[in-house]
Amino acid sequence: MLGASEKSASYLIEEKDPRGYVEGKGPSIAHGADMLASAISHPSFRLERAEQFLTAIGECLLHKDAIYIDGEDERLLYIVQELIKKDLPEEQLSTWVGSLISFIDEKEKEGYSLESFYLRKNVSNFLKALYFRLYYLKMGSEVQRNIEEFLHKGIYA
């Protein structure tokens, strides 16, 4: 049987409606992110499933056909923040951020499209938020450097 955190991660991966706030329903991705962050913050949570949860965030950033406009990037960041509080290894975070960046780089080699624009926009917004969260936490200098390189390259691409 799946626990709350696994169900929340599955929800984020399987969610088909990436729209932001919808009257009477709310924002699906943001609420799913809140649910997962809450489950991770529970005292009985163990870090063994961190990769699954990072994958869920990646799915939201890389495989939903929408530009997030209602704070979804910040809400997805809460998941990472909770994982960091549970001592997510910096190396694991760095590897995961590198995989997001590599995905964008590979997509853009195929040529620019509306899809690649959405991808870059969502990932850039998320990584900017992550950059500053790490800065304020005084951690993740390698991750911050990778983010800086990605953002700088995007400006001059």
Image (tube, rainbow, N blue to C red):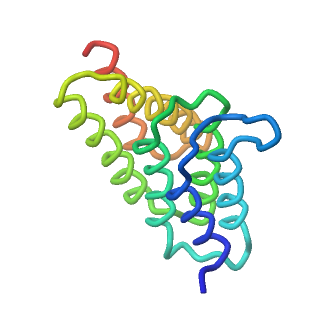
In this view of the protein, which residue sits in the foreground, 148 or 74?
A: 74
Q: Residue 27, located in which quarter of the rendered image?
A: top right
**Picture residue at 19% right of the left edge, 24% below the top:** 111
Number of numbered labels in the structure image: 0
Identify which residue is drawn at 45% across, 26% down: 121
Instruction: Name the residue rendered at 61%, 52% in the picture.
Output: 81
Residue 62 placed where, x, y %? 40, 42
In the image, residue 120 above or below residue 92: above
- Left or right: 38 in relation to 48: right
Q: Nearer the viewer, residue 147 or 71?
A: 71
Viewer-side residue, 30 vs 21: 21
Left or right of 117 in this view: 106 = left
Q: What residue sits 79% from the left and 35% below the top?
A: 23
Where is residue 72? Give x, y as percent: 62, 38
- Quarter of the figure with residue 92: bottom left
Nearest to the observer: residue 83 or residue 74: 74
Residue found farthest to the bottom: 1
The N terminus sits in image quarter: bottom right
Q: Residue furthest left?
A: 109
Tell me: residue 20, above or below residue 90: above
Instruction: Give coordinates of residue 63: x percent, y percent.
Output: 41, 45
Q: Quadrant of the C terminus?
A: top left
Residue 94 placement (x, y as % from top left): 37, 50
- Horizontal arrangement in the rendering, residue 123 relative to residue 6 (left or right): left
* Farthest residue, direction top: 156
